[in-house]
Image (cartoon, grey):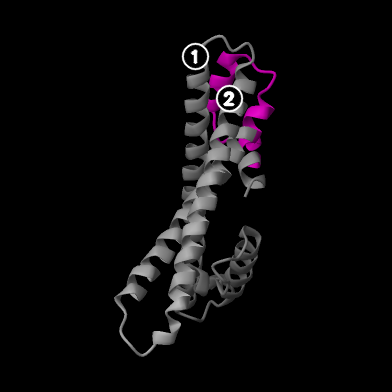
């Protein structure tokens, strides 16, 4: 039984849906509402632990994503400052990250082409369904690798997009202020850019 099934919500449930389900179940199964039921406390505890487990996973995932975006921004900002001569370091960072974004788009297109080619080749062997064909396993593996690569590239593009948006928010800051902001990564403005780029 998963924490989501305990709360009666799908794993794709929004934070609000999870919270509403928790509140509804916690109120319905609270031990104070069932003083004669010896199992009410246990049911309530299971519901509470399921909710806390979902919250913990969400916070951990968000923190990891925030750290990845911050690392991208720090790396770009440091690189621009090392190169020197940038009168507008934030603009230079945005330009650098957009170049990386373009490269990711090209890699995504190549991965998609490779995956689609493997699917087409596999489809051409369909007339041999009853005969064992070692190529089917190889082609299935290529398709799976292509899908995984595309998912990873998409995740990287989302991180870059969040970093670009956040840098644009920093356009009027001095370099030392940018470092200070990156040290406080996780502020509402940065999380807002990450959330809106999903």
Q: Residue 93 carries which label?
A: 2
Q: Which residue is drawn at 55% across and 42% down?
A: 159
Is residue 30 or residue 98 the one in the foreground? 98
Q: Which mark is residue 83?
A: 1
Highlighted magenta segment, given as a residue range: 165-192
Whether residue 27 is situated above or below residue 67 in the rendered picture: below
Q: Which residue is drawn at 33% across and 73% down?
A: 135
Q: Identify the secondary structure beneath mark 2.
A: helix
Q: Say few, some or many: other residues with alpha carbon within 10 Å of mark 2 (under 14 / 14 to 19 / 20 or more).
A: many
Residue 86: x and y, percent?
59, 13
Residue 87: x and y, percent?
63, 11
Q: Say few, some or many: other residues with alpha carbon within 10 Å of mark 1 (under 14 / 14 to 19 / 20 or more).
A: few
Whether residue 99 is situated above or below residue 117 in the rendered picture: above
Q: Residue at x 54, y 28 (%)?
A: 184
Q: Residue at x 65, y 35 (%)?
A: 165
User: Magenta segment, principal secondary structure?
Assistant: helix
Residue contact at pointers 1 and 2, CB within 8 angstroms? no
Single out the residue that lies furthest toward the bottom.
130
């Amino acid at each position: 039984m998963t924490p989501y099934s305990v709360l009666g919500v799908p794993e794709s449930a929004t934070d609000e849906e999870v919270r509403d389900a928790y509140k509804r179940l916690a109120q319905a199964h609270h031990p104070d509402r069932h003083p004669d039921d010896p199992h009410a406390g246990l049911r309530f505890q299971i519901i509470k632990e399921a909710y806390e487990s979902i919250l913990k996973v969400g916070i951990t995932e968000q923190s990891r994503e925030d750290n990845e975006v911050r690392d991208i921004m720090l790396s770009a900002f440091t690189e621009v400052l090392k190169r020197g001569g940038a009168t507008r370091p934030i603009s230079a960072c945005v330009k650098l990250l957009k170049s990386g974004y373009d490269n990711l788009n090209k890699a995504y297109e190549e991965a998609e082409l490779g995956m689609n080619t493997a699917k087409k080749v596999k489809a051409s062997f369909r007339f041999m369904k009853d005969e064992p064909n070692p190529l089917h396993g190889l082609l299935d593996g290529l398709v799976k690798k292509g899908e995984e690569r595309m998912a990873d590239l998409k995740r990287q593009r989302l991180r870059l997009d969040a970093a670009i948006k956040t840098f644009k928010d920093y356009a009027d800051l001095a370099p030392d202020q940018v470092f200070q902001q990156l040290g406080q990564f996780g502020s509402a403005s940065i999380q807002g850019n990450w959330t809106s780029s999903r």
